[in-house]
Amino acid sequence: MANSGAPRPPSALSGAAFARRSTARAQRLTTSREVRRTIVSLAGLIGVQVRNQSGQHVGRLVDLVARMHGEDRYPPITGLLVKVGSRTSFLKAASVASITHGSVTLSSARLDLREFIRRQGEVVLAKDVLDHQLVDVDGRQVIRAADLYLAPVGEDYRLVGVDVSLMTLLRRLGPKVWRTRPTPERVIDWDAVTPFGGESTTGPSAVHLRQSEEDLHRLHPSDLAHLLEDLDRSERKALLERLDRETAADALEEMDPGELRALLREAEPAYAAGLVASMEPDEAVDALRDLSEPERDAVLAEMPAQVRTELLGLLAYPERTAGGFMTTVLARAHPGHTVGEVERIVSGFRAHRNEIDAVLILDDDGALLADLPLFDLVAYPDSELISTVLHAEHHPEPLTVRADAGVGEVAQQLVRTRRSSLLVVDDEGRALGRILADDVLDALLPERGRMHFPRLLQ
């Protein structure tokens, strides 16, 4: 089927894009021997003495502040929170001469201690990031920050990596003398990490997704589903809000049913309705069936009338019948259409590409004549009439079942004919929906769900 304007699959990378990503990885700071030699553990710094240039005790370090909002790949440290007496004050990073294992030295004996007021885009590292969930885009997994590593880069100290190893957790629980020394067994470069949260001056604030947003959209829906399942409630919502509706819907369709149910229950009805309405009709119905009746009614009430009517119609069918797990997304054409015209019709269903493997061919009265596989369009020029294609290919009668057919009957039909899908029809033989082979598998395994192995650090 000729369609040169078809979009590139999300997982595909152009040569230029691949080169950019490869160059970015090669330039990551944690690959530098000098940086790895000078990294400092944030966990080891908390509580250490802060001294002036004369070596006099000034106070104890409470936390470090970094600016994550912006285009910096590695957030610069903008200041220190220091406990002086009974008061916690903010000290600008410009006042720091050096940060080493277990010590902070200032560049002057004069102190400019101020009240800390969080500025937009700033993060208090130990409070907001340490032990919190993050997304490792390269590794396609949710990680928990066991430690954060800083290093001098140019004139600044910057956040360069996150440690997620068990050894680091043990170090932090062990004797105080262990805590100051980094144990970089599993360090993920900060450039591969995506923290979640909104920009705020009153609470935790994190970076926009920057180049990582492109990477997230490129992940396969099943990888995004894994991330959603592993994230906490607030981080899960933040990730969904960064995805367009189509991408989010694809990910939701890959989620474990129990996890999806929990996600919809914890969301506001209007937000949940938007997510469900973006899913394929059969997947949306499965998600709604898993909710209690009051929850389902609340979500349906927030949907556009047309979508609500369609889903209510599908919900009326018993769950394990053909009508209960079919999709109503159907591409229709007539014998008088040309191949090129049918290609344009199919291209209008780009958002449902996984639900369409054939085109319904109807006569002038709407009666079903054929179920034309998309592959058959490839062999003919755009100017060829569909009627000619049907005649040349000797198409058999469409494979159909009634809406009340059981899942076993549907499976037997597909196995017997070796077809990839069949049509669900009403008493008059008019198409109501389509069932693909994977829909049958889902119906036969209602308690499906990916096997999750325990993750030591989750």
Image: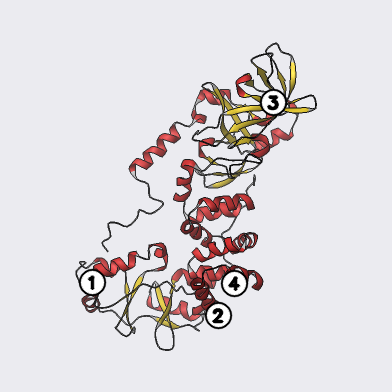
Decide: few, some or many residues near mark 1? Use Cα within 10 Å; few <14, some 14-19, many ≥20: many
Between marks 3 and 4, how big is the CA–CA gap?
56 Å
Q: Is residue 224 left or right of residue 454?
A: left
Q: Nearer the viewer, residue 260 or 375?
A: 260
Q: Amino acid at mark 4?
A: Arg
Cα separation between marks 2 and 3: 65 Å
The residue that label 2 is drawn on is 316
Which residue, given by chain and number where applicable, does mark 3 sit on?
114
Q: Nearer the viewer, mark 1 or mark 3?
A: 3
Please provide percent x and percent y for residue 277: 51, 66
- Looking at the figure, which quarter contains the N terminus? bottom left
Q: Are marks 3 and 4 in contact (CB under 8 Å)?
A: no
**Tell me, what colour scheme is on the image?**
secondary structure
- Image quarter of residue 312: bottom right
Disc 4: CA contacts within 10 A as few (<14), some (14-19) or many (>=20)? some
The three-letter code of the residue at mark 1 reads Thr
Q: Which residue is mark 1?
A: 338
